[in-house]
Amino acid sequence: MDGSSYYIPAAAMACALVLKAPALLRSWRDPLLRSVCTLLTLAGLVFLFAAPPTIAKVNRLTGITNVSAPLVYCLLSAFSAACLVLVVNWRGGPPAQTRLLTRRITAGYAVVIVALVVLFALGDAPVERLRDFDTYYARTPYLRELIVLYLTAMTVAGLAMTALCWRWALQVHDWLRAGLLIIVTGYLFNLAYLATKFTAVVARWCGGDLDGLSTYAAPVLASAGAQISAVGFCLPLACRRVGDSWTTWTTYRRLGPLWHELRPVSAHAGRELRISWWSPVELQVTQRESDIHDGMLSLYPYFDPAVRSRAYDAAVATGSDPLQAEAEADAAMVAAAVRARAADPEGRVIDAAEVTLASAPHEGSRDLVRMSLALRRSPVVAAVRGQAWGPPR
């Protein structure tokens, strides 16, 4: 593999990190989001510093022959820890237990990283090896232990990740299951990478020469495994965000009929501060709900519980369940109140009536959506609109 084979995945990880950066700045306390960004950062650094041109550059800048080897191995160990931490935070559970597991994983791999540095300092690697450090120094004291340690640490993480994600995938559905199965596939490539590395190193111990497995086959497997796993980590999170946005936009659109119904009678119609169309959809939903509530306030004197009671009975008679019948009854009372308000342009009812909040429709966000849909679809509401309704006495 040439330098581009490493730099392209590194650039892909950097792009993914840039896309995640705004969310991280907004919610930097979110452990799951921090874990994802840490994982992407470490994956990008592994590819960047494992590229042969970068290895040569780092060795030359530091003046220490083969210093890139422990650097890459430390990054790989940190990446393994980040993967385990991400799965622990992703899966959730009692916060105290999650924090304890995170600290244990971090501490364990921190010890591995320190040991790698110490073993490299104790060993002797005078000949620079850009691609085959593992096999060239497989029988060198201390460096031999260094190589076995980093491969073992990665193997433990790979087996744990594969088992955790596989068991979890059997318990969930939809995009989360797809992401977990993709991660498992990626880690199967990683385990194959480790198997080729171990095979080549053991062959050196036995006097054989299978260096090609480590030098040429292993990097391809590692690149494929890391990129597949990254897709698995990002896919459920991205799809969940898209799904949440779609749900919010659906709520915004479904509130439209009720919003349009109440706009003419809102006390602040035309005078409220409007948010821009490019504002987050959550803010637009909040604005629309606020407008609806303002309209409700102006209609309270015109709400007639008798209209609601008759509409509820009619909705139940047509086969609506109790929850839907309540939404249709509230919508019918709103439609009647709007007509009553239009028939009272001078606002005599507002001046004279005592507002009874108990007669107001339920205002939970789910009820607002049901009411809005009932305004458009319910034959009960259509029947109320076809009658003449005056202000309540």
Image (spheres, rainbow, N blue to C red):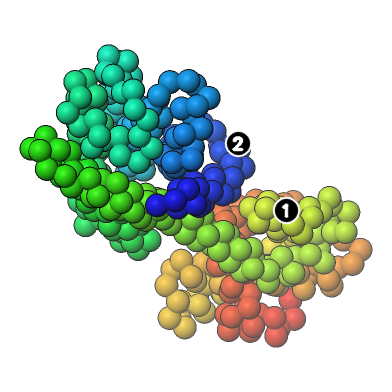
Residue 15 percent across, percent down from the top left: 56, 49
Q: Say whether residue 123 is left or right of residue 279.
A: left
Q: Nearer the viewer, residue 50 or 74?
A: 50
| Residue occupied by mark 1 | 279
Instruction: Tell me the CA gap for discs 1 and 2.
Output: 18 Å
| Residue at 38%, 61% in the rendered image | 175
Q: Nearer the viewer, mark 1 or mark 2?
A: 2
At label 2, the amino acid type is: Leu
Q: Amino acid at mark 1?
A: Ser
Residue for point 56% across, 38% down: 24
Residue found at the very far front of the displayed protein: 127
Q: In the displayed structure, would residue 142 be above or below residue 160?
A: above
The image shows residue 132 at horizontal and vertical percentages of 30, 39
Q: Earlier in the sequence, mark 1 or mark 2?
A: 2
Q: Are marks 1 and 2 in contact (CB under 8 Å)?
A: no
Secondary structure of the residue carrying numbered label 1: loop
Q: Is residue 386 left or right of residue 28?
A: right
Q: Nearer the viewer, residue 1 or 330?
A: 1
Looking at the rendering, which quadrant does residue 353 occupy? Answer: bottom right
- Residue 176 visible from this viewpoint: no
What residue do we see at 29% from left, 26% from top? 109
Q: Position of residue 190 (x, y in %)?
A: 27, 48
- Residue that lies at the very extreme toward the left in this rendered image: 206
User: Eyeballing the image, is 365 above or below 116?
Assistant: below
Q: Which residue is mark 2?
A: 25
In which quadrant of the rendered image does the C terminus lie?
bottom right
Left or right: residue 279 versus residue 46 is right
Please tell me how crowded label 2 is: few (under 14), some (14-19), or many (20+) other residues with Cα within 10 Å: few
